Image (cartoon, helix red, strand yellow):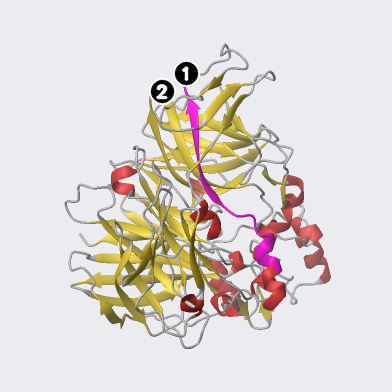
Amino acid sequence: MCLAACSSQPELSSVDTAGSVSLYLSPHVPAHSTVLKNFIRAEKNQLCISTEGEKEYIAPLFQTVEETPHPISTRITGTIPGWITGSLFRNGPGRFEFGNDKFNHWFDGMALMHQFTIKDGNVTYMSKFLQSDAYKSNESENRIVVSEFGTVAMPDPCKSMFQRFVSMFEMPKPSDNGNINFVKYKKDFYVSTETNFIQKVDLATLETAEKVDWSKYIAVNGATAHPHYDPDGTTYNMGNSYGKQGTFYNIIKVPAQEDEDTLHGAQVICSIPASDRWNPSYYHSFGMTENYIVFIEQPIKLNITKILTCNITGSPISKCMHWDPRCDTVFHVASKHTGELHPVTFHTQANSMFHQINAYEDQDCIVLDLCCQDNGEVFQIYNLQNLHKSGKALEEVYHSVPKSFPKRYVLPLTATSETPHGIKINPLSYSTAKAEKRSDGKLWCTPENLYDNTIKNIGGLDFPAINYSKCNTKKYRYFYGCGFQHLVGSCLVKVDADTKQAKVWQEDGFYPSEPVFVPSPHSCEEDDGVILSAVVSPQQGKTTFLHILDAKSFTEIGRAEVPVKMPYGFHGIFVPKM
């Protein structure tokens, strides 16, 4: 395996030829580190590190931890820029068992909210479990009583045989375990999963507040944990609905008025019929430009019949999903302003995606950048039994995971049903992405790869981030993410979308979370700011820390070491102190 590693000074080596990367090793890396023992070679304009040995045992990253309910101090090394004032909030699983019952899947763990507060060059840390109904019910019964994505709750032993039999025919109840992300609607912040429940949170204290049900405001059965925001505060999201008329993917608009509470004023502005009403697509995010929403209908399918009979079969939701490579991936484009669907759908080969990078309009086209996998059979891989493996067994699990790579699609909005067949359209001079009307009438899109060999050598890229406040829905140049040389993020990456060149930060035995970009005050350049990432380790002797990288040079500025262990989580946001 080859690895391009870029970290903080001192600089050890660099290659300045086209398509190259620079190598830096963190001053925190000990002299006996395997990174320093690796054989470094420059080959074909690429700096490589040969690595040997099996994957590190990472089970401690998926084990229950205690919450830290009051702010504690951290140990600062380097410098925390004085202009950073605010808090990084992170979300993810933090408890994996109740009594003798254990969850089966990483996604099932109870939500643990993390807060890193930065002020005057110092950092404090605290964390609290979300007091969801699922958490409180499990806690009070000292067993798992609420089913989650990969775990079916056992029947209540206090019920009679008849009551337990009748309960098998009840509809499965959605969980309110909001362990995916922090989101904002109007003036309030919530934690979210992908069911119809979101939970309001007091950011100052991490106390759980009001539970909100989407279905009380609009006819949807859930919403993603990745909404998009317009500059005026209007929020867009997507959620499914199921009924006699079929299955629909709904575009949701939540107005910015702060004088109204919760989701009042929310509306469905467009309903896109599923191509297969009984097997609609699963989706985790969507694209948004200044004027359009782009929905990606992918071949990860939800089997509605299996979901409706979960209680009878004893199957979790995770077993009601499947990958169907016979289906195309289809892009649906709808106006944000009128809800009108574009008359043409755009097709590409079967691939799956969880996270979009950015989308914008240029020269009557939509440019859509995504992290794509060529296989959607990923959910079962992340069960806790696999994550707790070691040695060769863990290595086999890792190699079964489809790798994610950044790709660019260009969707020509001028395409119509009258567009001639067989003519390849290369709509934008700066992109190799193409579109072609095929003989079957489909408008077929071929993407441009937004990566070089560096990204291949670090196991692909996901958990993407951009300078959202400056570049969302606009033409941009830089994006950030995690490389995946393991089952979780193993390094931080900055990619230049124009040149495909990458810079990589990595430190032995540490696993960084999703990067969050924080712009410098009064910044003019797109990458003028810092990257924040919570970095964890499965090793007892290594310390969790908040990492601060200079976004431009991608070198370390400072870190704040936290004297408690954290599990590996999902997503988060930075909220500046106003």
Taking 520 as reference, is 95 above or below it? below
Residue at 48 percent across and 83 percent down: it is 66
Is 200 inside the magenta-drawn segment?
no
Amino acid type of disc 2? Asp
Q: Earlier in the sequence, mark 1 or mark 2?
A: 2
- Residue 254 relative to residue 35: left or right: left
Residue range (magenta): 396-413
The crowd level at tag 2 (other Cα within 10 Å; few <14, some 14-19, many 20+) is few
- Position of residue 194 measured from the top left corner of the image (x, y, whole percent): 55, 54
Amino acid type of disc 1? Thr
Residue designated by label 1: 414
**Observer-nearest residue: 165 or 272?**
272
Q: Is residue 477 visible?
A: yes
Instruction: State the image quarter where residue 207 is shown.
Output: bottom left
**Observer-nearest residue: 326 or 336?**
326
**Observer-nearest residue: 489 or 173?**
489
Question: Dots 1 and 2: beta carbons under 8 Å?
Answer: yes
- Residue 95 relative to residue 30: left or right: right
Q: CA distance from mark 1 to mark 2?
A: 7 Å
Residue at 75 percent across and 56 percent down: it is 310
Is 409 inside the magenta-drawn segment?
yes
- Position of residue 178 measured from the top left corner of the image (x, y, whole percent): 50, 62
Q: Could you tell me which quadrant the C terminus lies in? A: bottom left
The crowd level at tag 1 (other Cα within 10 Å; few <14, some 14-19, many 20+) is few
Helix, strand or loop at label 1? It is loop
Spot the residue most to the bottom.
Answer: 541
Q: Could you tell me which quadrant the N terminus lies in? A: bottom right
Q: Is residue 568 visible?
A: no
The label number, if any, that marks residue 468 in the structure image: none
Residue designated by label 2: 364
Helix, strand or loop at label 2? It is loop
